[in-house]
Amino acid sequence: MPLLRIEVVYALPDRQTVLACDVAEGMTVGQSVISSGILEQHPEIDLENADFGLWNERVAQDCLVRDGDRVEIYRPLIADPKQIRRKQARDARKR
């Protein structure tokens, strides 16, 4: 079975981890994350609730990876961007 060359990426506010790895053809995003070894470096990643992307486009965990893909693991948002913009607009009107 041919191998695919991919990257698995996880970013924190102060650093990012980028792992290049070879995976078997037919592997899913979730399987690729597990086989990359990134969970050993970042045990805080919750695979059950994490969101994933390929090249900045959200995908399901069962999406198949292709050669050259960049698998991204997204952290949960701390604050809702819409709420932040609304608050900034209200504050600007008050000034």
Image (cartoon, grey):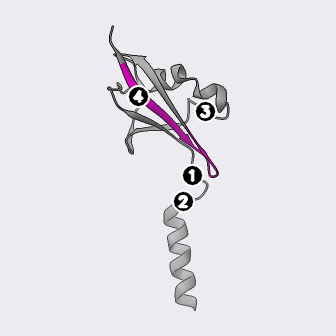
| Label placed on residue 51 | none
**Mark 1 or mark 3, which has the lower sequence index?**
3
In the picture of the structure, the residue carrying the numbered disc 1 is 77
Q: Check disc 1 and give the amino acid type.
A: Leu
In the picture of the structure, the residue carrying the numbered disc 4 is 6
Residues at circles 2 and 3 in contact by the CB criterion of under 8 Å: no
For residue 30, above or below residue 12: above
Residues at circles 1 and 2 in contact by the CB criterion of under 8 Å: yes
For residue 22, above or below residue 8: above
Quadrant in the picture for residue 38:
top right
* Label 4 crowd bin: few (<14), some (14–19), many (20+), radius 10 Å: many
Disc 4 on helix, strand or loop?
strand
Rendered residue at 42%/39% (across/down)? 53
Quadrant in the picture for residue 64:
top left
Q: Is residue 14 magenta?
A: yes
* Label 2 crowd bin: few (<14), some (14–19), many (20+), radius 10 Å: few
In 3D space, how far apart are the residues under numbered discs 2 and 3 (Cα atoms)?
Answer: 20 Å
Q: Check disc 4 and give the amino acid type.
A: Ile
Q: Check disc 2 and give the amino acid type.
A: Asp
**Mark 2 or mark 4, which has the lower sequence index?**
4
Magenta-tinted stretch: 4-17
